[in-house]
Image (cartoon, rainbow, N blue to C red):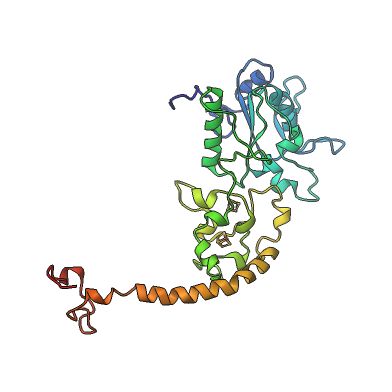
Amino acid sequence: ALPGVPKLRLHNPVFAGENGDEFMPRYEDAAAGRLDPFVLVIEGSIPHETNKSDGYWAGFGIDRNTGQPLTTCSWIDRLAPRAWAVGAAGTCATHGGIHAMGRNPTDCMGLPDYLGWSWRSTGDIPIVCVPGCPVQPDNMTQTLLYLLRQASGTAPMIPLDDALRPTFLFGPTVHEGCDRGGFYEQADFAAAHGSTKCIVKLGCWGPVVICNVPKRGWMNGIGGCPNVGGLCIGCTMPGFPDKFMCFMDEPPGARMSTSAVLMYGRTVRALRAFTKASLEKEPPWRNPAGAMSAESPAATQSDVKPDTTV
Ligand code: SF4
Ligand code: SF4
């Protein structure tokens, strides 16, 4: 229905009406080259299937010949080389996510680590990564829409950064888009949850995390982790979660940076309190006849006569 965007069929195990054997033919067609072109979107981390002697970590469908589960990795091996573009949805698919934490027996990884960071699709496009735990829905939709426009020749090559993230989504930090930035600048830090002040002392990693969620919100522009009191735990970052542990502690760097802004912040906060108190009062020349005296503090603009001399 969108002008300039090619007709699209979405095959997704969650949204599909079919299930079991009825659901699989689309994937078998794609793997056999009977479905062209298609965009492959992977969600979830990629396990290391060869790090054990038997069994499997993740499967998708059944091999009709053997009756055995088909591993997710075998599907990626067959589908990715035929895909016009390949996307990774969410931090698990992009960087491995929680399942790739140290000492996880699956040895999970993200799609670029599995296929290779310099891998390119049949459309000559690198893997397109949209991290987030979960991925912000509008970010994913916007990325897919961009790819469809590129497929139809109405958009140039999708711009990606070194981590293969769309640059139109990933650039500024959480802190740079946070509603609570003014409190940080004035060194006004929350001591407990439930406060509307900056929550860096409670464990917010926003100053060093690349994510547009505070600007974009979660649904219909509403929400966005620290905007509504949720600590930023760096869920979009390649180092997540290991490098952000423990989530509920003040980040080590925050102790130094908040100390650095403390003197400046407290000073400007005090000075602004004076200025604000002054600005809260109308200028004296608007009250020549004593209409705003202590006896009549509630005078309104309608009380001011048009011929009042200033
Ligand atoms: Fe920055 Fe977090 Fe404070 Fe927001 S709550 S201003 S992101 S440190
Ligand atoms: Fe994840 Fe932080 Fe972005 Fe929230 S603000 S989505 S925790 S990176």
Residue 191 appearing in the image = no
Q: Residue 194, relative to residue 44: is it above or below?
A: below
Q: Residue at x 69, y 24 (%)?
A: 79
Residue 219 percent location from the top left of the image: 47, 47
The x and y percentages for residue 24 are 63, 24
Left or right for 150, reference 110: left
Across and down, in percent, residue 134 comes to 59, 46
Q: Nearer the viewer, residue 176 or 243?
A: 176
Give percent across and percent down for residue 245: 71, 59
Report the residue at 49% width, 53% height from top. 223
Q: Is residue 275 above or below residue 252?
A: below
The residue nearer to you, when weighing 275 against 191, is 275
Residue 309, picture quadrant: bottom left
User: Please, which residue is most extreme toward the right here?
Assistant: 53
- Say which quarter of the image contains residue 256: bottom right
**Vertical position of residue 50 compared to residue 31: above or below:** below
Q: Quadrant of the C terminus?
A: bottom left
Q: Residue at x 78, y 48 (%)?
A: 104
User: Is residue 183 in sight in this rendering?
Assistant: yes
